[in-house]
Image: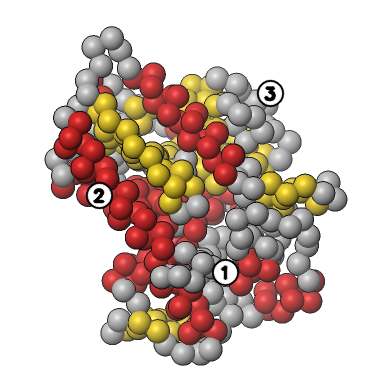
Amino acid sequence: MQAHPSLAARKRVLGLVALAASLTACHSEPPRTEQESYVFGTRVVITVVGTPAPQARTAIAEALAELDQLHARLHPWQAAGSEVVALNAALAAGQAAPVSPVLAELIAASQHAEALSDGYFNPAIGQLVALWGFHADSFTPRQPNAARLATLLARQPSMAAVVVTEGHARSRNPAVALDLGGIAKGWALDRVAQRLRQQGIQTALINIGGNVLALGAPEGRAWKVGIQHPRAAEAMAVVSLADGEAIGTSGDYQRYFEWQGTRYCHLIDPHTGRADCPRQAATVLVERGEAAGLRSDTATKALFFAPTDRVATYADRFKVRAVLRLEADGHAEISPYMATRLTWLKPPAVITPLPHFPSPKTAP
């Protein structure tokens, strides 16, 4: 039996992204300022290029401070200052609780993403996540009580049961418990990008635990970002990100444990309650558009669980053309457009095209 704390894995992801981003450097490199923090249970790195260091440091510090505040308010199990913990207690008791505009916005975005994904993305399953033991910083290798698991599934917690009116939230289903870990990083990407733009930052790379959003183009060139290999401390591919584009991955290698020869991860199928992940990872590249960061986070959950013949359907709903999935046996499934956007460094032995995707347009 083996339990795996997630910090080391997340550091590898961030390190590889930073390494890939550095490929843009040259001998006459413009001013470059980088700061990092640890937020949302993961490492955050913000890199600003082409802005004087004092201005860049101030803008980054303000963004990181806001992320720290959001981390405390949105934490799903640490009660000190968590608006989510307080709300979940009220929902379990059949009561209403006040919600801030920030939490109300996230609830609405979560409801929309749940509907688009036919429930493959479902932040209302916080009780299920806790039952598997993933509301902790380290994990005990075990399976949950089968009767409790079946009872919880039968109650069908869903974001659709949550109603927000006049600054208060309530649920028609007391089994609902919010865990916004599958949306908060992507949503925060968009929020940080907006803040940096307001501070006059034109060129930056925002990396929240491997969910990355690009601003501008350093020296007129795209940012280079690595895609983590789920089973090795190295990048398996590099993609180029243009201004406003985002990339995100959901994988079984960040928060997981192994028990009796099976890997169980925090990506729990809301339909079955199973945590024995069906594949290693799903990655999307989201082109410039509304809520690119948020979509880079939520779309990967639907695409991680979806059957192969349904991937194109869900990708279209989230307005995503570039999809890469790494299956349990290590072979890759890739959409035609993603194939035009990445360069393999360590290609899998088998790469197959995802069906039902349109032919790619010229890559930006």
Contact between marks 3 and 1 (CB within 8 A): the answer is no
Q: Which residue is mark 3?
A: 349
Residue placed at 51% from the left, 81% from the top?
Answer: 89
Q: Which residue is mark 1?
A: 126
Q: Helix, strand, or loop for circle 3? A: loop
The way the protein has been coloured in the rendering is: secondary structure
Task: Tell me what residue is drawn at x 54 percent, y 77 percent.
Answer: 176
Type of the residue with mark 1: Gly
Which element type, helix, strand or loop, lies under badge 2?
helix
**Contact (CB < 8 A) between labels 1 and 2?**
no
Q: Nearer the viewer, mark 3 or mark 1?
A: 1
Most extreme residue toward the right, as rendered? 260
Crowding near the residue tagged with mark 3, few <14, some 14–19, many ≥20 C-alpha atoms within 10 Å? few
Disc 2 residue type? Glu
Mark 3 → mark 1, Cα distance in angstroms: 37 Å
The residue lying toward the viewer, choosing from 357 and 68, is 68
| Alpha carbon distance from label 1 to label 2 | 30 Å
- Residue marked by disc 2: 62
Q: How many marks?
A: 3
User: For numbered disc 1, what is the local secondary structure?
Assistant: helix
Tag 3: amino acid: Ala
Asked if marks 2 and 3 touch (Cβ < 8 Å), the reply is no
Residue 92 appears at what percent x and percent y? 54, 84
For image coordinates 63% across by 67% down, the residue present is 130
With 284 as the anchor, is 29 left or right in this view? left
Query: Which marked residue is nearer to the observer: mark 2 or mark 3?
Result: 2
Q: Counting residues from the N terminus, which is met first, the one under dot 3 or under dot 1?
A: 1
Q: Look at the picture and state if 137 lies above or below 251.
A: below
Q: Is residue 193 visible?
A: no
User: Residue 80 versus residue 149: which sits nearer the camera?
Assistant: 80
User: Which quadrant would residue 207 be assigned to in this image?
Assistant: top left
Point out residue 209 in the picture as x, y percentages from the top left corner. 47, 44
